[in-house]
Image (spheres, rainbow, N blue to C red):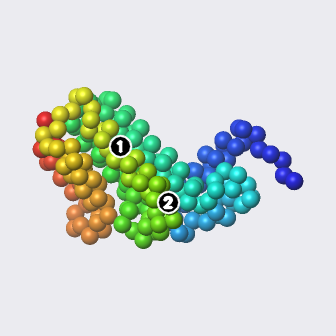
Amino acid sequence: MPKGFSEQEKNNIHEKLIEACKENWEKFGYKKTSIDELCLKVGISKGAFYLFFGSKEALFLETLSVIQNKLYDLIESILLKEQNKYGVAKALKAVYAEYDKSPFLYDTSQADFTSFINKLSEEERQSIFFDSLYGAKQMIEKPFLKLRISEEKALSVMASLLFLITGKDKLVCNHFDVFDFMLDHLIDDIFE
């Protein structure tokens, strides 16, 4: 019978599983990431994995939540330093750069992401959507910002800009340049 893990070991293993999941998800996608591979990377047995997560999907869902929270922290740190619409533009550029580093995580139109989402409960799927919407709303509902357009339109415009990442390979110009150009020209129409 294996010895039990101490609280510190549990915390370390939990964090390592999330980090390993993120790394593999970024490189290989959801479908090609196996629990066996993650356990090998972290140094635990497959049986021990289930002490931490009930399923592969539970690990991926928590990993996605951790990643979203880090993005929100990044946005907040930028807006703390630059409390105006140009801070929002800078934050969106940072988010776009993160999306570019991890296409499997953010391209929700890909079959790999759809495969992950389809294994989740309706409540879990809604949670992903509402967490994302909540994060976007937090960004634009700052006391130092005033919208020129409706909140719904502002959120939709920003989401559309970020969605450019899914077609980056079809552009004849550098996609970062295109994103920056569009955002720099739209920011004054979104905020006063």
Asked which secondary structure carries label 1, the reply is helix
Q: Tell which residue pokes out farthest to the front in this image.
A: 122
Residue 145: give x, y in percent of width and height: 21, 33
> Residue 47's image quarter?
bottom right
Residue placed most toward the observer, 152 or 187: 152
Does any portion of residue 27 appear in the rendered image?
Answer: no
**Circles 1, 2 touching at the beta carbon (< 8 Å):** no
Residue 179: give x, y in percent of width and height: 24, 54
Label drawn at residue 63: none
Residue type beneath disc 2: Ser
> Residue 69's image quarter?
top left
The residue where tag 2 is placed is 121
Asked which secondary structure carries label 2, the reply is loop
The residue where tag 1 is placed is 134
Counting other residues with Cα less than 10 Å from the Cα at mark 1, is it few (<14), some (14-19), or many (20 or more)? few
Residue type beneath disc 1: Tyr
Q: Work out whether 53 lies above or below 148.
A: below
For marks 1 and 2, give the CA distance: 20 Å
At 37% across and 57% down in the image, what residue appears? 100
Tag count? 2
Residue placed most toward the observer, 86 or 58: 58
Q: Work out whether 97 lies above or below 57.
A: above
At 15% across and 48% down in the image, what residue appears? 186
* Dot 1 or dot 2, earlier in sequence: 2
Instruction: Decide if residue 48 is on the left or right side of residue 173.
Output: right
Counting other residues with Cα less than 10 Å from the Cα at mark 2, is it few (<14), some (14-19), or many (20 or more)? few
Residue 110: give x, y in percent of width and height: 39, 68
